[in-house]
Amino acid sequence: MHTKDYDEWNEKKKLIQAEPFQKFVHEREIWWCSIGLNVDDEEDGKNEQFERPVLIIKKFNRHIVLAVPLTTRFKDNKYYFNFEHDGVQFAAILSQLRLLSTKRFSRRVRRINANLFNEIKEKIVEVCL
C-alpha cells in the first residue's frame, strides 16, 4: 500500500490559503485544482501541486463552487460519466462531487458545451441526490 505524505500536502495547503485568488471561474469550465491528499478512496490530486482537473457544476460566489473531479480512466458504472470534449477523453467521478474554494484553482483548461454540461448535471442528480 502506498503511504501518503500528508505533511507535504498540509504545507501546500497553507500556501494555497495564504494566496488571494484573482481569477474568475464559471460553471461549465474545467480547471486544474489542488484537490489534495484525501482519505481512503476519496480522489487524490497528482504531482507536487496535488492537482487534478475538476468540472465546475455550480458557482455559489467567487470563493466557493460545487465541482466534480475528472479522470482519464474510464469505468463502466453508474458513478462515472464518460465523455469526450474537443478530442480529449474524460470521466466525471460523480460520487466525488464536492464543495471547493476557488483558491485551489490554478489554471483553466477549457469550457464544455452546454448540452454536455446538462447531461452531466442530470446524471449527478440521478446518482447523487
Image (cartoon, helix red, strand yellow):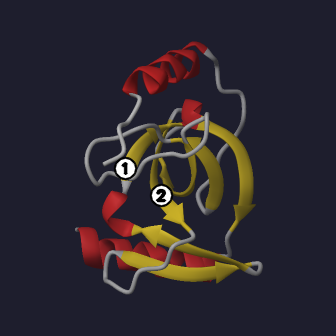
The answer to whether 102 appears left or right of 126 in the picture is right
Pointer 1 local density, CA inside 10 Å: few below 14, some 14–19, many at least 20: some
The residue singled out by tag 1 in the image is: 98
* Mark with earlier residue (1, 2): 2
**What x and y, as percent, mark residue 100?**
45, 40
Q: Residue at x 71, y 27 (%)?
A: 22
Residue 71, relative to residue 33: is it above or below?
A: below
Q: Position of residue 6 (x, y in %)?
A: 38, 27
> Residue 79, can we see it?
yes
Q: Residue at x 52, y 32 (%)?
A: 63
* Kind of residue sitting beneath label 1: Arg
- Whether the residues at callouts 1 and 2 have beta carbons within 8 Å, the answer is yes
Q: Amino acid at mark 2?
A: Pro
Question: Picture coordinates of residue 19 (x, y %)?
Answer: 63, 17
Choose top left, top right, bottom left or bottom right for residue 15.
top right
- Secondary element under disc 1, as helix, strand or loop, is strand
Of circles 1 and 2, the one toward us is 2
**Quarter of the image that includes the C terminus:** bottom left
Helix or strand or loop: what does disc 2 sit on? strand
**Location of mark 2 (residue):** 69
Q: Is residue 41 left or right of residue 16?
A: left
Work out how far the residue at label 1 is from the one at label 2, CA to CA, in angstroms. Answer: 8 Å
